[in-house]
Amino acid sequence: MEIRTFLGDITKFECDAIVNAANTSLLGGGGVDGAIHRAAGPKLLEACRKFNGCETGQAIITWGYNLPAKYVIHTPGPIWRGGGNREEELLADCYRNSLELARDHDCETVAFPSISTGVYHFPLDKASEIAVRTVKDFGQQPSIIRQVTLVAFDAKTKEYYDRALQRI
């Protein structure tokens, strides 16, 4: 499996599935979550309402609606509370569970945002290493997924992802 980084807007990214750094209500919010909901259109919110939320670290899948991606995989990331509340484990679960859903829906290409590093304040250095390590570990098992792109909204995030890719 190829892992690469990309600087840009995940809502415009063409792939089989994009991952949404959702909140536990799944009803949209700020940052990436709000941008994905706006770009996908009102049918996404309608679909998300049927799930009655999602626990941190878990993932659910919907159609992409007006997005260039066929699917949106929604995963609520952990809020950083200093590192003593299983935050690292839960963040790894976000990536792993999202990849499992992508695999189960025959996705060959998946794009992730930087989960939990915005308003949830997960340290970017830790988050980028967890993302890269979890995706690389997942890539060791047989899967239809051939490419995972870590989409960074800003140059600083991309730099952290690139460094993590070189180290791990």
Image (cartoon, rainbow, N blue to C red):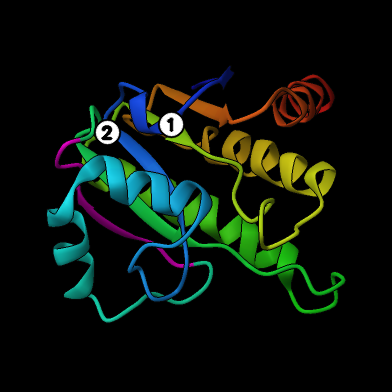
Q: Position of residue 18 (x, y in %)?
A: 36, 38
Is residue 65 inside the magenta stretch?
A: yes
Say whether residue 38 is left or right of residue 21: left
Distance, label 1 to label 2, CA atoms, is: 16 Å
Q: Quadrant of residue 133?
A: top right
Say whether residue 146 is left or right of residue 132: left
Residue 101, can we see it?
no
Say whether residue 111 is left or right of residue 3: left
Q: Position of residue 1 (x, y in %)?
A: 49, 22
Between 164 and 45, the residue placed more toward the observer is 45
Between 111 and 9, the residue placed more toward the observer is 9
Is tag 1's residue or tag 2's residue first in the polypeptide sequence?
A: 1
Label placed on residue 10: 1
Label placed on residue 107: 2
Label placed on residue 121: none
Q: Quadrant of residue 64?
A: top left
Q: Secondary structure at mark 2?
A: loop
Tell me the residue at 26%/30% (across/down). Answer: 16
Disc 1 residue type (three-letter):
Ile
Q: Position of residue 122 (x, y in %)?
A: 75, 57
Q: Which residues are magenta?
A: 58-66
Residue 16, can we see it?
yes
Q: Are marks 1 and 2 in contact (CB under 8 Å)?
A: no
